[in-house]
């Protein structure tokens, strides 16, 4: 379980997140939807301790992110908005292995795990390709592979469909759906209403505040208008 309690966050003296409380249970598929600049990325970086609340708390399986425990980074996998921010090596295979290398996983096991995940994501044929020569959609899958190979319990995806063409969009969403079915807890950050249809829970952010949260994937029209999610 990830528990966000009265989270406030400021950059210098600008308040970005205002008193956010949210619980993410194991097996949930939470969609966090909000307009540009509403604080989605800032919130998502709190879920694995990349950012620490100015006030309030975030706890992952009972462990407060303020303690800076490394297991939190391992349990909460994070796919950033721009896949290029998390690709480090030029060969796909090496790139996906990067995190495992950091965790000191033996070479032979590493190879098996990397190959398995590339197959799961349908990009095994790209194992020896140069990351820099891939399409944006392919880069996104490589970035996702690098996170999944660490076998996280929670997966945070920050606007994974932004900048993708319809075909790749469909592909990434069906992949996320499969991962959820396999038991992964999903936190999908988006500003596109149609992306929330797979969700079991929705949280609506607006101007750094949690405007609404509820079960299922239906958000009342009134809320969508207030959150500026129409037009
Ligand atoms: N490093 C930073 N320093 C100062 N302000 C920032 C920084 N990152 C984001 N912000 C501000 O925080 C607000 C929320 O940003 P962000 O979390 O990226 O929103 P979203 O992901 O919903 O578009 C914006 O007003 C943005 O300008
Ligand atoms: Mg963002």
Image (cartoon, grey):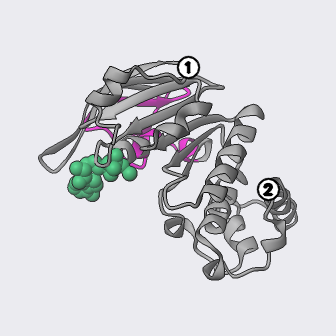
Q: Residue at x 71, y 47 (%)?
A: 175
Q: Residue at x 32, y 21 (%)?
A: 222
Q: Residue at x 41, y 31 (%)?
A: 58
Is residue 24 one of those drawn in magenta?
A: no
Say which mark, if any, is on residue 216: 1
Which residue, given by chain and number where applicable, does mark 2 sit on?
Answer: 117
Query: Horizontal and vertical percent for residue 127?
Result: 79, 73
Mark 2: few/some/many CA within 10 Å (<14, 14-19, 20+): many
Is residue 55 one of those drawn in magenta?
A: yes
Vertical arrangement, residue 170 with respect to residue 126, above or below:
above
Residue stretch rendered in magenta on the structure: 45-73
Query: Horizontal and vertical percent for residue 155?
Result: 60, 42
Q: Quadrant of residue 106?
A: bottom right
Q: Secondary structure at mark 1?
A: loop
Q: Secondary structure at mark 2?
A: helix
* Camera-nearest residue between 13 and 167: 167
Distance from the alpha carbon under mark 1 to that under mark 2: 30 Å
Q: Quadrant of residue 33?
A: top left
Query: Horizontal and vertical percent for residue 171?
Result: 69, 52
* Camera-nearest residue between 174 and 14: 174
């Amino acid at each position: 379980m990830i528990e966000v309690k009265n989270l406030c966050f400021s950059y210098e003296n600008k308040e970005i997140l205002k008193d956010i409380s949210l619980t993410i249970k194991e097996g949930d598929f939470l969609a966090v939807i909000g307009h540009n600049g509403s604080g989605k990325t800032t919130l998502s970086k709190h879920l694995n301790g990349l950012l620490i609340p100015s006030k309030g708390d975030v706890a992952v399986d009972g462990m407060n992110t303020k303690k800076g425990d490394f297991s939190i980074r391992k349990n909460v996998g994070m796919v950033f908005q721009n896949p290029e921010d998390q690709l480090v090596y030029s060969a796909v295979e090496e790139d996906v292995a990067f995190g495992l290398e950091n965790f000191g996983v033996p070479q032979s096991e590493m190879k098996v795990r990397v190959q398995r995940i590339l197959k799961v994501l349908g990009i095994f044929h790209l194992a020896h390709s140069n990351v820099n020569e891939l399409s944006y959609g392919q880069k996104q899958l490589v970035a996702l592979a690098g996170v999944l190979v660490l076998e996280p319990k929670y997966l945070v995806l920050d606007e994974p469909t932004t900048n993708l063409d319809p075909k790749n969009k469909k592909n990434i969403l069906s992949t996320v759906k499969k991962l959820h079915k396999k038991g992964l807890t999903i936190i999908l950050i988006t500003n596109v209403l149609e992306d929330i249809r797979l969700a079991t829970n929705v949280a609506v952010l607006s101007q750094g505040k949690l405007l609404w949260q509820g079960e299922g994937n239906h958000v009342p029209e009134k809320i969508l208008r207030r959150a500026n999610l129409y037009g």
